[in-house]
Image: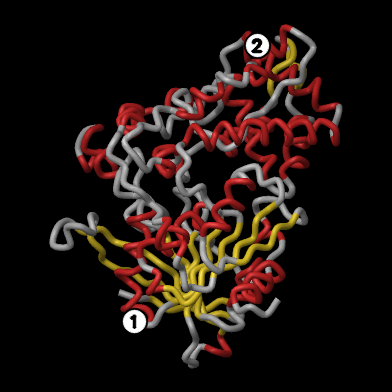
Amino acid sequence: MTATYRQPGLVLTDRRFTVPLDHDDPAGETIELYAREAVASDRAGQNLPWLVYLQGGPGFGANRFVGKGAWFGRALKEFRVLLLDQRGTGHSTPANRQTLPLRGGPAEQADYLARFRADSIVRDCEAIRAQVTGGAPWTVLGQSFGGFCATTYLSLAPEGLAAALITGGLPSLDGHADDVYRAAYPRVERKVVAHYARYPQDVERARRIADHLLTRDVTLPNGYRLTVEAFQSLGILLGGGEGSHRLHYLLEHAFVRTPQGPELSDAFQEEVQGLLSYAPHPLYALVHEATYGQDERPTAWSAERVRAEFPQFDAAKALAGDEPLLFTGESIHPWLFDCDPALRPLRETAELLAARTDWQPLYDPARLAANEVPVAAAVYHDDMYVDTAHSLQTARAIRGLRTWVTDEFEHDGVRAGGPRVLDRLLALARDEA
């Protein structure tokens, strides 16, 4: 079933597809995928090449654009764009605390979610490509985790690709989750130090909030338990171009005076719960570390284990001395499933995924070394989310890949840089730069 409608300058069509849950069992259970087709209204009748967008995450549905913002407007000048909700996200058979009990108990839920990684997403794309393009290859634009998916695409089904454009998303081809986080914590520390250099008043503000949380039980209006570790995880903001400023403005109105003494303000609590809640994207918390699983070693709450190797992130130790509180970044921890009401019912499911030892490889180094698909990748010089050194190592391993290494943007450069980023990648892929 399709529905077509308009926004100024755009023709949009809702498209739904049925694909196997397990592509190795094509006659078995199926799930539904949703994607929004977009074309410029003055080109709606033309036979245009296709660009499919793979969102970052994992666990986020595709962008819901209003108009032609960011990279989207540039893409519409020459492509029909397919904004795909990857399986488990958006309208594509969403996976969350409300729907997962339909699968059964935690063991059944974990087995189900093990099929929601990049390899399944790529095979979904191949399953629907013939219906969308008539069998012609398409260009893929992968942001962040979407870039991981694009790299898997190049490994599993390069024949489906006319070109691959990757922004902030070249993964390590063989790194375990432990390797990823050992590289991540020092990067996060650099971002925090840079934030405090920009806003030195935030050092005392962050320490004061952390001390408040260490000595009191705070529950946000939505039922989220705001522990000091949860507060530190607001450092995830620091990976975006405006993130440092957003964190500063959040910290500056943390407290109000009350008859009982200083308390965290309602405004602060309301904003924090919106930033910390996984209710809109629980799949991110459930399968984030699984995106790094490629062998018989469990991920085993890697971010939590590796954090112990970096004692400077311990809030109590920082407050006991004169050290600034260090925020953390993009990492998932077992305590999240105690703090967040959207995740609490899924704690045992998450434990089973963390213990899983049957992950299959997501990348094929031999096939990548023989790659013939035009590939271009934007690599951000000090990306907080994806390690630059790992990305450049992978870039060297993919035959013909051309990189644009820049410090002009943070991880969200494809949004902030918009048309210019996409222009540059298209030129590199076409060998026009």
Which quadrant does the C terminus fall into? bottom right
Mark seen at residue 348: none
Indicate whether 152 appears above or below 226: below
Is residue 422 positioned above or below 398 on the image? below
Task: Using residue 262 as the reference point, say whether residue 137 is left or right of it.
Answer: left
Residue 357, x across and y down, in percent: 29, 34
- Count of numbered labels shown in the rendering: 2
**How was the colour assigned to the protein in this rendering?**
secondary structure
Q: Which mark is residue 316?
A: 2
Distance, label 1 to label 2, CA atoms, is 58 Å
Identify the residue at horizontal 77%, vertical 16% (top origin): 323
- For label 1, the residue is 135
Q: Nearer the viewer, mark 1 or mark 2?
A: 1
Q: Is residue 319 left or right of residue 308?
A: right
- Image position of 117 (left or right of 317): left
Query: Label 1 is placed on what type of residue?
Result: Gly
Q: Which percent across, then down, holds residue 385?
A: 60, 44
Question: Do we see residue 69 in this rendering?
Answer: no
Residue at 73% of width from left, 26% of height from top?
254
For the residue pair 177 and 253, the one nearer the viewer reads as 177
**Mark 1–mark 2 contact, CB under 8 Å?**
no
Q: Is residue 144 visible?
A: yes
Mark 1 neighbour class, 10 Å CA radius: few under 14, some 14 to 19, many 20 or more: few
Residue 89 versus residue 425: which sits nearer the camera?
A: 425
Q: Residue furthest left?
A: 27
Q: Position of residue 91 (x, y in %)?
A: 38, 58
Q: Nearer the viewer, residue 80 or 99?
A: 80
- Element marked by disc 2: helix
